[in-house]
Image (cartoon, rainbow, N blue to C red):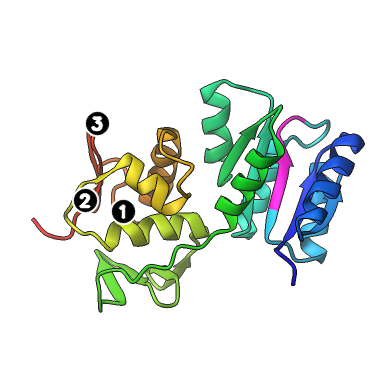
């Protein structure tokens, strides 16, 4: 049984060959593309679970490819980058990536990041409550659907898992480390930029006024809180 289907997107053929061999040996089915444009074509014609996307490529760069992929898909995306700059890492996440890995990286690190992006958190939010209405936004936890004004709102799997975990502990501040390890996995805990970006993405989708959130509340220096009562 396949461990998952992964699309490698990198303009360097040696990197694509090395990653293909490594991932295939771990049970993944692997496809590859040499550009952002080719990656979009592959994703239109075939089904994958995760994209490994190089940030710096000629033609369409990784950031733009990530934005275009995310516009029409909830697929897991890991950005590969040589940059250590926080603005570039935040930019990758804000473009829609679930995670990023800085080159050069070790095989165990990459495999751990892939597992983290593909893992799915089993949660039963709010105990027996399976649906929730927040000022016109309806959240169906059982079916993983969010609607606002009769229109479906797309959440990525990681966005939905973050929302689920917060909703499972309403009116309680959840520490950054707890959130990161619950949603991304036990190897995480210091990546506060992940939470900042993903919370902003969630607020834009479900808060009436994202700049002044009523439900997804920041408790400075402590964590985040899903506020359901005064």
Residue 182: percent from the left, percent from the top? 39, 53
Which residue carries the number 3 mark?
A: 221
Check if residue 36 falls in the magenta segment.
no
Label 3 to label 1: alpha-carbon separation: 22 Å
Check if residue 54 falls in the magenta segment. Answer: yes
Tell me where residue 229 appears, x and y as whole percent: 12, 59
Magenta segment range? Answer: 51-56
Q: Residue at x 63, y 58 (%)?
A: 75
Q: Residue at x 67, y 52 (%)?
A: 69
Which of these two is toward me, 227 or 105?
105
Q: Nearer the viewer, mark 3 or mark 2?
A: 3
Q: CA distance from mark 3 to mark 2?
A: 18 Å
- Quadrant that contains the N terminus: bottom right
Relative height, residue 27 to residue 90 (above, below): below
- Asked if residue 67 shows in the view, the reply is no
Please give left or right for residue 139 compared with residue 14 in the image.
left
Q: Which residue is mark 1?
A: 207
Depicted 223 relative to depicted 214: above or below = above
Horizontal relation, residue 100 to residue 136: left or right: right
What kind of element bears circle 2? loop
Label 3 Cα neighbours within 10 Å, binned few <14 / some 14-19 / many ≥20: few
Marked residue nearer the N-terminal end (3 or 1): 1
């Amino acid at each position: 049984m396949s461990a998952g289907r992964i699309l490698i997107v990198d303009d360097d053929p040696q990197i694509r060959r090395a990653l293909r061999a490594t991932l295939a040996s771990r049970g993944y089915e692997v496809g590859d593309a040499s550009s952002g444009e080719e990656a979009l074509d592959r994703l239109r014609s075939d089904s994958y679970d995760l994209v490994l996307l190089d940030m710096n490529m000629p033609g369409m760069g990784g950031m733009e490819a990530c934005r275009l992929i995310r516009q029409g898909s909830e697929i897991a995306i890991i950005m590969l980058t040589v940059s250590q700059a926080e603005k570039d890492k935040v930019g990758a996440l804000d473009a829609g990536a679930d995670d990023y890995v800085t080159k050069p990286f070790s095989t165990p690190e990459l495999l751990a990041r892939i597992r983290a992006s593909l893992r799915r958190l089993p949660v039963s939010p709010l105990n027996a409550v399976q649906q929730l209405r927040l000022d016109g936004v309806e959240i169906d936890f059982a079916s993983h659907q969010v609607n606002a004004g009769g229109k479906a709102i797309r959440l990525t799997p990681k966005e939905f898992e973050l929302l689920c975990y917060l909703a499972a502990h309403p009116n309680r501040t959840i520490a950054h480390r707890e959130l990161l390890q619950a949603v991304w996995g036990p190897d995480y805990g210091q990546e506060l930029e992940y939470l900042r970006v993903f919370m902003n993405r969630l607020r834009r989708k479900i808060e009436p006024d994202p700049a002044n959130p009523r439900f997804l509340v920041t408790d400075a220096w402590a964590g985040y809180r899903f506020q359901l009562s005064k």
